[in-house]
Amino acid sequence: MNKPKMATEKGVPSNSKIAMLLCQLEKMNEEVLVRDVETARLVTAKILHLIQTQERSGKEVMSKGSSGMEVILSSLENSRDVQTTLNIMSILSELLTVGRGRRVGVFVSKGGTGVLFQILISASKELPPSEELMFQLHSLLAKVGPKDRKFGVKARLSGALNVTVDVVKQNLQNSKVLLPCLQVLRIYSNNSVNAISLGKTGMVEIIFKIVGPYSKKNTSLFKVALDALGALLKSKTNARRAVDSGHVPVLLALYLDWHRNDTRHRCMLIRKGLLVCLRNITNIKLGRRAFLEADGIRILYHSSTECLPVRTLDPLINTSSLIMRKCFPKNRLPVPTIKSAFHFQLPQVPPGGPVDQLYNQLSGVDDVVDESDDDEEAEGETDTENDEDKDQCSLNDDIETDLNKLHPNRNIGRPFEELKDYQKFFSELSEDFQGYSFDFSKSASTTSPSTYLFSSSSARFSRPAEVPTAQTPSPKQIPDSQNVCTSVKEHQTLSSPFLACSQTPLDLDTIHLSKNKEKQEGINIPAPDRRTAPTSISTSLSQGHMIEQELSHPLEGVSLEDKGNQNAEAGSEKVKHEGSPVNNLRHFQPPLLLGGFPIRRTGGGGSNVGSDCGSEGTEDEAGDAPLLEVPDTAQLLPLHDPDLYVEMVKGTQSVPQYAEVAYPDYFGHIAPMLKEPLLERIYGVQRSKIFQDIERLIHPNDILDKVVYDIDHPSSMIEENGESLKFNSQFESGNLRKAIQVRKYEYDLVLNADINSNHYHQWFYFEVSGMRTGTGYRFNIINCEKSNSQFNYGMQPLMYSVQEAIGGKPQWVRTGTDICYYKNHFARSSVATGGQKGKSYYTLTFTVTFIHKDDVCYFAYHYPYTYSTLKMHLSKLEDMRTPQIYLRQDVLCETLSGNTCPLLTITAMPESKSTDHICQFRNRPFIFLSARVHPGETNASWVMKGTLEFLMGTSPLAVNLREAYIFKIVPMLNPDGVVNGNHRCSLSGEDLNRQWQNPDPELHPTIYHTKSLLQYLAYIQRAPLVFCDYHGHSRKKNVFMYGCSVKETVWQSDISATSSDLQEDLGYRTLPKILSQIAPAFSLASSSFVVERSKESTARVVVWREIGVKRSYTMESTLCGCDQGKYKGLQISTRELEEMGAQFCVAMLRLKRLTSLRNHQNLLDLESDIIGTQSKNVSSCTTTYVLEEDEPSFLEAIDYSAESNDEDAEPESDVCGDGQENFDQLSDSETIHRK
Ligand SMILES: [Zn+2]
């Protein structure tokens, strides 16, 4: 060490007493030879005294610019006298006790740790070593260790590790010395190499000798010993050593002993320490086995149950729960295979592709669980340091760093010959409007270009890639119901075996609608449950701008004395209504009603399927049945029409050949006016759910294990017996595979995998009936796959009650309590995890108490939006057309299963057929929008609906917008996925948003043709101004965008780029910036403009890179809600989603103004504003690279990892001394693991 000068900040020696003493000390360091032991003792004792008695002396030594610490350390280093050394260490101890972290930080930065280790080594050579010195040294080390990141390494390299071990061995009976030594050992052990090395010295065994049964003595020693033991047991080698020596039952017995005797809970930390040891031992399979053999689950379950009433014991319960979950034997998912229950024969199966792999597994191989899970995990522990921060690496791993790839190449890569066929989708570019009357005062001209897409008789287009044209405008065809029936009949005769036993909520063949066309203001709403509500209810229906008063009217009561009479009275009820002045009802006949409620027909499916839909016979039959009267949602929802919906369903092709319609899709959904706040998570919910799961193991006899729904074995579906709920999801977008009644009011539900795949389950949509009221039913969806979910952060599932719909509230509402999402004990096969063994599924659990008896309720992950709904909406959009609107609906292509993929063109008609006007019309920039490539992201469709409705509207903004742009819209890129209830994929078993680089015309037709449209535009130099693909995001709040920027990508990586590489137009920022100003749900802070490698085949990146669209985006809408802006704290509903779609349009108009030359100044202002924020970004190194999820952690640990090292629990610092309490709290708020 150099010879530091004691000086104050200004370099002028201070006159204070402490300064003078330090100067003296400093001089003594220089005059090594003439050192006077007595003087040294005296000076250091005086300094100690001053520091002990005068606070300012300490401050002065530690003040910035003072070299006091150097002087002290230098003296310590040079001291050869034990008493002087002790004095100096007392000085340090005094100094470092105050000011907490900062002073220790200074000490560490001046090399203090090294000096202490050096003294420790030399002191150990004295025989016998000074006990006092060892005590002081270890006390100081314990204080310093947590603040020194290299503490463990320094200890090992200096040899201090072994000195401490020896001191421990020599002082087993001397708790004064033992205590700080164990504290230091605990810090040493945080380094995995040290832990192994300490294990070899027998330290695990030694500590087991120190800890013992309940005693009021030595509790602090026990606590510290357990801390050290816990740290040592993080090493797998040490854990195995402990198991081999039979210490698992010992730990359990000790825990039970302390649990029983520590009745006043004074030794919570010791109990916690024992649990932490168990937790770390059970990280290895051997440990888990020993734990189970020692009846650990039962012991921890019962002790935890006894702890439940005492809130301060929560840390014990939480840790116990963690251990029990980890050791809970892995269960087999109760399905015969994890492959989708449905298979779709692809026209070609690419060798080695996902479908090839899926169906070419050896037959007879069980893909549900891994063949062998028994072999002990490879426990080779490396002897290398693992100090680096791995998170940092993985964070940046995905960023594209290849500058060539970061620069758009605009190479279409296809000859124009291949693309010129797409000209037919751009007839607006050649249309001359001759023969079209521009006299808009008259009614719409029949020559207005239009195609009605979805008439049931729509032609089948042969594959591949035979693209139908819409160049010849045809008048809107109203589907002829007779035709529809025929076509439906044709495909239904091929229907699946499920139909025979299906419980039909709404059978296509038997739907009859007799609607009184006279529109009246009132709505007649009969009471849904006549027993509880003998008088009828008048309920207002409202949708945003709807005027609810107008629609709501008191109405005459419909009362039935008792249930038994209902059938008899039903007829008169019908008469009564028909005669009533309030006629705006749908007289909706079968399914039958019971207690005012529909009972689905069971059996007889075959004959029903075969019968003529709409036949007189069925109607007659139904004449005896009571009527289901539902509000005319067609009147309330501009784009909804139940009749039309049914027609649309008939033309929809599903792989399971669904013949049922779910009520919510039929009735429609009117967004509730109520605010739906994010659900506040109640502390302990997860824990209590997990305890219920553990009880299955403890009390196996209480478990019913009764299959009540199973599409793999339709025959096992039970008949109604009143004891079980009935499930169904055999309708469009439904995807329940199996339901098992676990307890009287609890069901395990299994979702079906995406078709031609064996995973991707997260989306759900199913129906429940046969419920009782007043009881909470617990539903567990047990094969979720994502590692975390917004269900942990305030999101609720959606429920649609048919009783409520009939009662005047046809709406999806956020429902459910006790919601949480956690890793469960169902093993996930490595077949579905990309080879990783030992993974588990996740459970989404929620509890619902039904209000209505005999209700039919639907549950969904998010607001359903089926393909048939889209077709209905598109058809209704035609009705919104005015002569000024140019709307063309083309069929872009057919999907694999023969559904059509619609393409919309929306703009304004030219003002006249003058050349100028036609020219202006043709030269409008294109805006290209798409949505719903991921079927589970229904929110994207609702946003798209908002966009479409706005674009077709009559507001001046909409008029301006149409005059400004030509909108090309593919509203649903993955109809097949949507129809079949997939979460992520198309029928090819692939994520279509990873196919944009090389879409296959046969396997990915919608992507292939959409990309071709864009390529065509690029070829004719008309690449769109904006491309945006609407998505939904399951793990973040708000609405936000992903864009592409070279600059921002480079900033996030460490690649070096020349300034010319970074020349970039900031235009990509404009649109999100505008959105953040006008759309309350939109958050610029959540947006990111980094190009990731894993996203290189997404629409956004490919359209940016290959088509050269600089404003190419993915717009992500939350499934949950907002945490900023006007909607902060609320769950998102279709209202906000549709509003977002409309605001996107408004933003386009602003963008137009900003990009037009006339308003150049505005643009500059905006851009400089943007530049301003960006340079700020650079200087402060903040990042716009957004993590997958950005939720704060909350109190309950979400994850437990049997397969991981579980290095999580304790933060390394603040572990000793006065940080103890703090530590304990921290370790109980274990953070969420991000994968
Ligand atoms: Zn998506």
Image (tube, grey):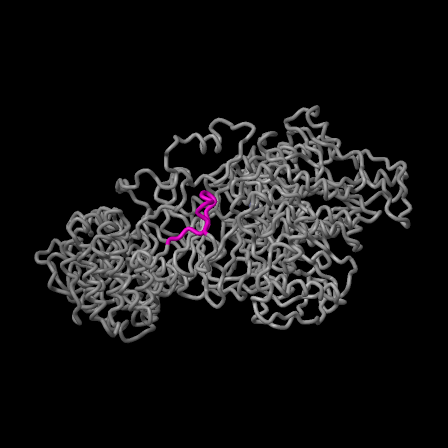
User: Is 222 placed above or below 1005 here?
Assistant: below
In the image, is 633 to the left or to the right of 1205? right
**Which residue appears at 61% of the width and 29% of the height?**
1001
Q: State whether residue 649 appears in this view.
A: yes
Q: State whether residue 786 appears in this view.
A: no
Give the residue at the far left of this rendering.
127
In the rendered image, which quarter is residue 148 located in?
A: bottom left
Residue 270 on the magenta segment: no
| Image coordinates for residue 424, horizontal then vertical, percent | 75, 32
In the rendered image, which quarter is residue 432 located in?
A: top right
| Image coordinates for residue 1080, horizontal then vertical, percent | 64, 59
| Image coordinates for residue 413, horizontal then vertical, percent | 63, 27
User: Is 781 placed above or below 993 here?
Assistant: below
In the rendered image, which quarter is residue 656 located in?
A: top right
In the image, is 1202 to the left or to the right of 290? right
**Which residue appears at 45% of the width and 32% of the height?**
359
Q: Nearer the viewer, residue 1051 or 570?
A: 570
The magenta span reads: 705-718
**Which residue appears at 54% of the width and 44% of the height?**
499
Q: Quadrant of ligand 1?
A: top right
Q: Nearer the viewer, residue 117 or 994?
A: 994
In the image, is 1169 to the left or to the right of 819? right
| Image coordinates for residue 200, horizontal then vertical, percent | 17, 47
Q: Nearer the viewer, residue 132 or 380?
A: 380
